Image: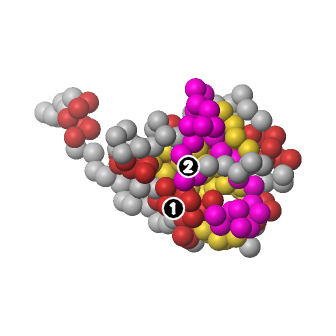
Amino acid sequence: MVEELTIIEEWERVKVPTVPELEEVKLKLRESALLVLDIQNQNCNEDRRPRCVRTLHHIQMLIEKARNSGMLIIFSLTSAASKADIRREVLPKRNEIIVKAGVDKFHNTKLEDMLRENGIKSVIIVGTSANGAVLHTATGAATRKFGIIVPVNAISATYPYEEQYTVWHLMNSPGTRRRVILSKAEMINFV
């Protein structure tokens, strides 16, 4: 007789997938943009999401590299936030763009138009709510045929599983798997 398992029992037997390979990335400066998603005081702090706080230095490093290279940087806020809510460590400069949206930063914003007008072909996506903003914005970028680079040490969620799931989804989903490269902040260079 075949043993019948409940859904929960089946889930308990699931084996963790192998850790994906991270790649060194060399991007064409004028064809790439950095998207910094939802790094706000309310959702990136030691009480609510300490994992986000631990990614800040990696995000800062990428912002600095992008600024020094003259790369396009676009920041995002959640729908209810304002510029004053952005953490000081990643505060946009006066001329840098901010979009406000739900989880998909392309939805009801001019993000795609801004990227196209600047000749952008690839986006580096960093930020918090990996299972929200990062996942859905990367999916939105993939459907618009942008290349996507996700430095895994510059994304965060409340729990490690949410980050793990997001990375697994990006690397295995039919919509994103051929467009996403996983890397680390220090493995991304511009040419």
- Residue 174, quarter of the rendered image: top right
**2 sits left or right of 57 in the view:** left
Residue type at numbered disc 2: Arg
Q: Is residue 176 visible?
A: no
Give the labeled residue for mark 1.
58
- In the displayed structure, would residue 188 be above or below residue 112? below
Q: Earlier in the sequence, mark 1 or mark 2?
A: 1
Residue type at numbered disc 1: His
Q: Residue at x 37, y 38 (%)?
A: 48
User: Element type at marker 1?
Assistant: helix
How crowded pointer 1 is (Cα within 10 Å; few <14, some 14-19, many 20+) is rated as some
Q: Nearer the viewer, mark 1 or mark 2?
A: 2
Query: What's the distance in space between the residues labelled 1 and 2, CA to CA?
Result: 15 Å
Please state which of residues 1 and 112 is positioned toward the viewer in this rendering.
Answer: 112
**1 sits left or right of 7 in the view:** left
Q: Residue at x 69, y 37 (%)?
A: 99
Residue 1 horizontal/vertical position (percent): 13, 33
- What label sits on residue 88 in the rendered view? 2
Magenta residues, as a range? 64-90
Q: Is residue 42 magenta?
A: no
How crowded pointer 2 is (Cα within 10 Å; few <14, some 14-19, many 20+) is rated as few
Q: Is residue 19 visible?
A: yes
Residue 107 horizontal/vertical position (percent): 68, 31
Residue 27 horizontal/vertical position (percent): 70, 67
Q: Residue at x 54, y 53 (%)?
A: 89
Q: Residue at x 71, y 67 (%)?
A: 68
- What label sits on residue 26 in the rendered view? none
